[in-house]
Amino acid sequence: MVVIDLQKYKKADNRLLREITALRDDEKAVGLSRFFKTGPGQYGEGDVFLGVKVPDTRRVVKDCWHECSFGDLDECLASPFHEVRLAALLALVQMFQHSKHDVGRQRECIEFYLAHLAAVNNWDLVDLSCYELLGRWLLDKDASLLRTLARDGKTIWEQRIGIVSTMWFLRNGRLDDTYVIADILLQHPHDLIHKAVGWLLREAGKRDKERLVRFLDTPADGAALLSRCQLMPRTMLRYAIEKFPETERKKYFEKQKDGR
């Protein structure tokens, strides 16, 4: 158990750090630690929670992001406390969004983010930062960075960043990258990647269902005669076809069963 030095944080010059830690709630922290799987051998092993709700974190960030320097964010991202790291990432998103007429400043935000990916180490930290930052930044650029993260990422979090960042592309009608990265991660062993890929495929299908159907029904490269829906984990498929009519969902589950 991490002992929190209240005096240390009360006196911190870093306002973001000071105000987030002041909201700690030990009872809520226990529930959050359980929800985010921080036990031995679980995906969030070793993560430490203050017990601060996301709406409260957002409120603090809204009030003080404009006072934050990169040094302040660096200090927060080095914190053992999950909510402090989340606050720093949300503040970075605000800095990036409010610099839309300053490409140099936006580039600094992206370079800072990429230099601190080790601190983006749980699924909510990924999902609440990556597409607002990398997705926005790369919308009119080459997205090979995302493919590299998905294929060669050192952690499941970097790999998840690769696929979830394409959410911004989908919202702007750019579907190709989601399908390319889904293929890279099609047979990934981790459940959190299965869910992320299925989620993004579902979102792509909302924009063009026929294309999603073609993707599911055709073989991946080097997969002989097996279609993608037969190769992908069941969780990924379940997420991807969640919005399909029940009869279509049953057909895909049967098809997957027949291929195994």
Image (cartoon, rainbow, N blue to C red):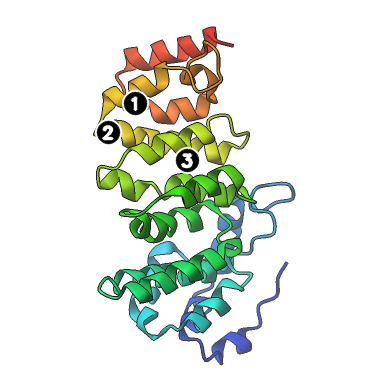
Tag nearer the camera, 3 or 1:
1
What residue is drawn where x is 47% and y is 17%? 219
State the mark number for residue 196. 3
- Marker disc for residue 212: 1
- Image location (x, y in percent) of residue 242: 37, 28
Which quadrant: the C terminus?
A: top right
User: Viewed as shown, does residue 57 lie left or right of 222?
Assistant: left
The answer to whether residue 194 is above or below residue 222 is below
Image location (x, y in percent) of residue 92 = 42, 71
Determine which quarter of the picture holds residue 38. Answer: bottom right
Q: Earlier in the sequence, mark 3 or mark 1?
A: 3
Q: Residues within 10 Å of mark 1 (few under 14, many from 20)?
A: some
Amino acid type of disc 3?
Answer: Ala
Q: Are marks 1 and 2 in contact (CB under 8 Å)?
A: no
Q: CA distance from mark 3 to mark 1?
A: 16 Å
Which numbered disc, 3 or 2, marks the residue that appears first in the sequence?
3
- Which SS class for mark 1? helix
Q: How many residues crowd mark 3 within 10 Å: few (<14), some (14–19), many (20+)?
A: many
Q: CA distance from mark 3 to mark 2?
A: 16 Å
Question: Residue 103 placed where, x, y %?
Answer: 32, 72
Name the residue: 59% across, 64% down.
Answer: 119
Instruction: Assign the N terminus to one quadrant of the image.
Output: bottom right
Q: Which circle, 1 or 2, is nearer the viewer?
A: 1
Spatial CA distance of label 1 from label 2 is 9 Å
Query: Helix, strand or loop at disc 3?
Result: helix
Closer to the camera in the image, 194 or 144: 144
Residue 146: give x, y in percent of width and height.
Answer: 47, 49
Mark number displayed over residue 206: 2
Query: SS at mark 2?
Result: helix
Q: Nearer the viewer, residue 202 or 57?
A: 202
